């Protein structure tokens, strides 16, 4: 058909310059022929002509056209429609995809020549438009993403008073503000030197004590250094507005192009002041609940708290904890009330309380009844208990004889670590002794306190004690590094080194029957040999001994000791003194070989010893920042020299005011039992200034940046691991948020309440006690359309009788780096899964959501733990969804991606929680594959009244859909919020409108909202 028409062929060749192929079609007979010089088109293997163009086009489309585009040839290119469109001049181009080598490639079918009155044929051309379609799609995608990013930027700007966009190369900047009326971001000002302008502008507006930190932050080099190690840098400071300080927060980060800074500034004054007011109100309420209104001392509630804490320590194996109890009872209070009235009785009670507190000045005193008080003996009062109880008794007797002053009976008992299993046993003994004393006061015998086994009183003549002390001082001079002991063998009265007393929890430096007391610390397997040696010495058959045994320290662990002693005889060859020294080989393992300081094990040992001895202390953790740069530039050997120099200077700087330790890496610690926080803060500032000025090592000038956390300990019913966790948290705040300024644990946590550290200790102990007090609540997740239950989020809670219910954000940030935290996370996962198995029986599509901390993801065996838990519980992985937050940016992104891909490959779903609350949310969504993105409740609170929030949610939902993730919106509280969200790409909903977090039993009986 026309193949021999030379003119026609020339026309076709010309057309094929622009078109992949050309169809010539006879409109009367339907005959056709196509021409093409494109080898890809010929590879389709379709007939080059035929008798029925329209029928054959449908046939060919089935073979070579993408299935979604075949309707064009089935319906649009039918003869009647096509001819009609040609005649009307309305025929359009058709875009479709040809399958070339199995790959869809965009082509366009266009009319080249239509029908005319004189001609009965028409010509169609096909052109490859793959590149044009790609360009167009990319342009549309860019436009759509730009609109989304603009909307997100506007929404983020609405959360800040001011945003600065700064060129990191030339310091040019723009200042943006959010117009609340128009809802748009507007440029307020521009400048050419941001950092200089800001320092000039804010110099007189900043609260004096905050200027140093802010000016450091407004330094480009410092800011770049900060952003090298973290995605975002924030600083809280105070602006002077109308002569009053207002709390403000500065947040800085890199823009996505990595050539601009973005700095946001927001007013947080009202937020922080409300937190302070709530914390102060709670603190006051706690204090009032634990204090006696009449006397001002602690009341019965506080005493019961003490009793529970001490009893817990005893039950947990801390049976070496030394303490004593004195029970006091006012004589004849009823007679005073009856004869002189209750006002006089109240004054009598206050006078009695004053007497008790003045004598036992270093111990807590409790009023536990109308006329009854209890003293909990600790620290120096415990060691001097005999002298103090005697002084108290003598004062009472004097009051009774002269008829002036309160008359108070008293009785004392000391905890016996071998026989006492209950706190109440000690109390009851003291109470019995008190009634004996009360009786003697009433009958006028004024019998002296029967001190008995709770006494340190020993009948030794003064000259003998003087001689014993002289021998002790002499041996101490030549026995450096060992524990010295001297025993007067005639009175069995001894003096031991203070370090031995502290390390092993002995009653005092001076002891009666020290051999028997020390025997209780000897390992059971070594006791027989020890007893044989001591018996031989005291029977006069041996002149001394040289032996090894294992001795139990305060923390219950045993150290290997070598004990050497010699018997000194009098002029008649009768044994008079047994003198010697004990070398503790375990202590040698507590020395850091690089600096010569006590190491982390020594730090923990001394910390625990001070806690057990009830020694109030200030602890400071000090670390060297950016130390890796020194190692990289000068080498590790030079770095070790720097650590040695720093450790030596710190040791000399602290002097006799405390003990210095080298912890892990570049961190050091100071424990002081004599300094107050203010003194230690001043010493740290002096230390920091010294190393900021720099010093020379091998002709290299070195400047060190320091970080420090501080903790005061005045409560001793906590373990050393809890103290360390709180101290480490304060140090981290100094390093990350305060540019090295010293951070004190209580103050920088808004002083939530005085019992925070005790609460943390109890919570941490609960993990070791089979997770006692921990439990899970479940908040339903429903399908957005049907409102049927499709899942739930497992939420951790903790409670006990003393502290009530404690939400996880009060303890997880501090304890999440604790070695026990990973075990808690495993318990949460397993408990949630076991509960979910019951729910799946009722709701086959049910998915349980479990929150993760970024520290769990750091563990090398995290994935194995999840998979083994699933296997152990026989739980289908597709019904588990693990939620991570934007804090996961702190991890290596490749590590995180491997974890997510691995878990998703096994069927586990992954969700990004609190999307939109952090500046890194978009980056995380782009780089990691998520199944679900949960939009934080803060973005929907005003959605019924605020158009901006609706726009914002739409943008977020579009972003999530773009990356193939389903959207869950949290914080749904009304049906109106739900109805609005149905207009967007929202898959599921969660919030109080459907249910508050509930127990598993209530969730099992959950009724869908629409029902």
Image: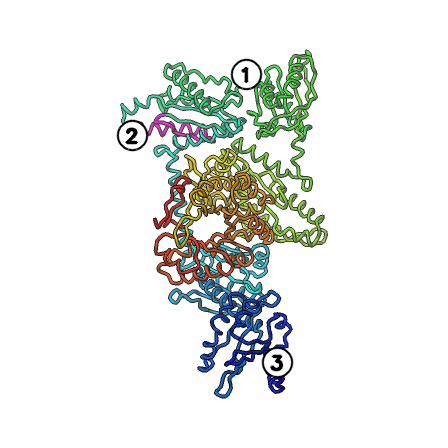
How much space separates mark 3 and mark 1, taking CA atoms?
A: 123 Å
Q: Which of the two labelled residues, at mark 2 and mark 1, occupies the earlier sequence position?
A: 2
Q: Are marks 3 and 2 in contact (CB under 8 Å)?
A: no
Numbered disc in front, either 3 or 1 = 3
Few, some or many residues within 10 Å of mark 3 (<14, 14–19, 20+): few
State left or right for residue 288 relative to residue 906: left
Q: Find residue 606 and report its horizontal and vertical position in percent.
A: 58, 34
Q: Is residue 664 above or below residue 390?
A: below
Closer to the camera in the image, 44 or 495: 44
Q: Residue furthest bottom?
A: 118
State left or right for residue 209 relative to residue 296: right
Could you tell me which residue is drawn at 49 percent across and 53 percent down? 932
Q: Which mark is residue 17?
A: 3
Task: Report if residue 350 lies within the magenta region.
Answer: yes
Q: For the residue labelled by badge 2, is the local secondary structure a helix, a strand or a loop?
A: helix
Closer to the camera in the image, 905 or 76: 76
Q: Find residue 609 and report its horizontal and vertical position in percent.
A: 56, 32
Q: Which of the two labelled residues, at mark 3 and mark 2, occupies the earlier sequence position?
A: 3
**Residue 57 visible (yes or no):** yes
Q: Which quadrant of the rendered structure holds the N terminus?
A: bottom right
Task: Report if residue 398 lies within the magenta region.
Answer: no
Q: For the residue labelled by badge 3, is the local secondary structure a helix, a strand or a loop?
A: loop
Q: Which residue is mark 2?
A: 343
Q: Find residue 518 and report its horizontal and vertical position in percent.
A: 60, 22
Q: Which residues are magenta?
A: 344-371
User: Splitting the image into 4 quarters, where does residue 951 fall?
Assistant: bottom left
Could you tell me which residue is drawn at 39 percent across and 53 percent down? 786
Q: Find residue 539 and report its horizontal and vertical position in percent.
A: 65, 12
Few, some or many residues within 10 Å of mark 2 (<14, 14–19, 20+): few
């Amino acid at each position: 058909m026309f193949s021999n028409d030379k003119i026609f062929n020339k026309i076709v060749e010309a057309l094929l310059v622009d078109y992949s192929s050309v169809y010539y079609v006879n409109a009367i007979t339907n005959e056709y022929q196509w021409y093409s010089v494109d080898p890809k088109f010929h590879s389709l293997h379709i007939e080059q002509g035929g008798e029925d163009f329209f029928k054959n086009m449908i046939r060919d489309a089935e073979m070579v056209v993408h299935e979604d585009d075949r309707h064009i040839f089935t319906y649009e290119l039918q003869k009647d429609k096509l001819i009609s469109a040609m005649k009307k001049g309305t025929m359009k181009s058709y875009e479709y995809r040809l399958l070339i080598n199995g790959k869809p490639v965009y082509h366009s079918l266009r009319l080249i020549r239509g029908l005319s009155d004189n001609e009965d044929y028409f010509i169609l051309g096909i052109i490859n438009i793959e590149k044009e379609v790609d360009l167009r799609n990319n342009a549309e995608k860019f436009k759509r993403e730009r609109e989304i990013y603009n909307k997100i930027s506007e929404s983020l700007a609405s959360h800040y008073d001011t945003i600065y966009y700064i060129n990191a190369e030339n310091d040019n900047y723009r200042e943006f503000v959010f117009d609340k009326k128009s809802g748009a971001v507007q440029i307020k000002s521009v400048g050419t030197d941001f950092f200089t302008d800001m320092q000039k502008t804010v110099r007189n507006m900043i609260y004096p004590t905050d200027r140093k930190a802010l000016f450091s932050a407004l330094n480009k080099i410092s800011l770049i250094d900060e952003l090298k190690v973290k995605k975002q840098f924030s600083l809280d400071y105070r602006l002077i507005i109308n002569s009053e300080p207002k709390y403000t927060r500065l947040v800085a980060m890199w823009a996505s192009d990595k050539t601009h800074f973005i700095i946001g500034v927001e007013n947080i004054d009202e937020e922080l002041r409300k937190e302070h007011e709530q914390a102060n109100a709670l603190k006051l309420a706690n204090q009032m609940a634990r204090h006696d209104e009449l006397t001002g001392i602690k009341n019965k509630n506080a005493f019961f708290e003490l009793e529970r804490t001490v009893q817990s320590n005893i039950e947990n194996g801390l049976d070496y904890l030394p303490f004593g109890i004195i029970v006091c009872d006012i004589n004849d209070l009823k007679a005073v009330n009856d004869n002189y009235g209750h006002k006089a009785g109240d004054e009598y009670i206050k006078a009695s309380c004053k007497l008790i507190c003045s004598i036992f000045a270093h111990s807590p005193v409790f009023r536990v009844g109308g006329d009854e008080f209890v003293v909990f003996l600790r620290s120096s009062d415990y060691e001097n208990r005999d002298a103090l109880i005697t002084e108290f008794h003598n004062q009472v007797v004097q009051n009774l004889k002269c008829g002036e002053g309160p008359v108070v009976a008293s009785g004392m008992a000391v905890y016996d670590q071998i026989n006492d299993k209950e706190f109440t046993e000690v109390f009851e003994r003291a109470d019995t002794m008190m009634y004996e004393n009360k009786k003697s006061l009433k009958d006028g015998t004024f019998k002296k306190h029967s001190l008995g086994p709770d006494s340190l009183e020993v009948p030794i003549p003064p000259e003998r004690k003087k001689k014993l002390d002289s021998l002790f001082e002499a041996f101490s001079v030549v026995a450096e590094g060992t524990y010295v002991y001297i025993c007067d063998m005639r009175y069995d009265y001894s003096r031991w080194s203070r370090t031995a007393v502290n390390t092993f929890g002995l009653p005092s430096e001076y002891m009666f029957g020290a051999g028997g007391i020390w025997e209780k610390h000897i390992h059971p397997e070594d006791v027989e040999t020890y007893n044989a040696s001591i018996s031989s010495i005291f029977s006069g058959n041996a002149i001394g001994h040289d032996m090894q045994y294992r001795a139990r320290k305060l923390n219950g662990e045993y150290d290997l000791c070598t004990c050497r002693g010699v018997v000194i005889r009098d002029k008649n060859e009768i044994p008079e003194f047994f003198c010697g020294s004990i070398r503790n080989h375990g202590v040698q393992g507590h020395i850091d070989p690089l600096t010569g300081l006590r190491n982390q094990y020594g730090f923990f040992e001394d910390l625990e010893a001070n806690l057990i001895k009830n020694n109030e202390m200030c602890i400071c953790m000090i670390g060297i920042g950016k130390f890796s740069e020194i190692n990289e530039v000068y080498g590790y050997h030079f770095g070790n020299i720097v650590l040695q120099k720093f450790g030596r200077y710190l040791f000399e700087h602290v002097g006799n005011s405390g003990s210095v330790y080298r912890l892990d890496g570049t961190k050091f610690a100071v424990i002081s039992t004599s300094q107050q926080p203010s003194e230690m803060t001043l010493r740290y500032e002096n230390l920091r200034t010294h190393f900021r000025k720099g010093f020379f090592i091998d002709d290299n000038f070195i400047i060190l940046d320091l970080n420090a956390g501080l903790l005061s300990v005045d409560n001793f019913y906590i373990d050393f691991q809890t103290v360390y966790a709180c101290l480490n948290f304060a140090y981290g705040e100094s390093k990350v948020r305060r540019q090295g300024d010293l951070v004190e644990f209580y103050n920088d946590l808004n002083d939530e309440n005085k019992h925070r550290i005790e609460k943390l200790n109890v919570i941490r102990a609960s993990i070791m006690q089979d997770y006692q007090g921990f439990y899970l609540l479940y908040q339903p997740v429903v399908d957005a359309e049907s409102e049927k239950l499709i899942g739930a989020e497992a939420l951790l809670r903790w409670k006990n009788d003393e502290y009530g219910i404690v939400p996880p954000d009060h303890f997880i940030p501090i304890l999440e780096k604790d070695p026990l935290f990973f075990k808690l996370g495993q318990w949460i996962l397993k408990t949630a899964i076991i509960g979910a198995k019951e729910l799946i029986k009722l709701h086959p599509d049910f998915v349980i959501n479990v929150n993760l901390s970024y520290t769990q993801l750091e563990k090398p065996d995290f994935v194995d733990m999840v998979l083994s838990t699933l296997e152990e519980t026989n739980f289908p992985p597709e019904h588990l969804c693990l939620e991570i937050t934007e804090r996961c940016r702190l991890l290596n992104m490749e590590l995180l991606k491997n974890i997510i891909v691995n878990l998703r490959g096994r069927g586990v779903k992954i969700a990004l929680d609190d999307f939109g609350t952090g500046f890194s949310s978009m980056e995380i969504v782009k780089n990691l594959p998520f199944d679900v993105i949960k939009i934080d409740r803060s973005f929907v609170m005003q959605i019924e009244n605020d158009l901006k929030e609706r726009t914002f949610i739409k943008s977020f939902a579009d972003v999530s859909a773009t990356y193939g993730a389903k959207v869950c919106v949290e914080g749904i509280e009304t049906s109106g919020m739900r109805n609005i969200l149905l207009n967007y790409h929202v898959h599921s909903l969660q919030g109080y409108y459907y249910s508050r977090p509930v127990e598993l039993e209530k969730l099992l009986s959950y009724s869908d909202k629409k029902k």
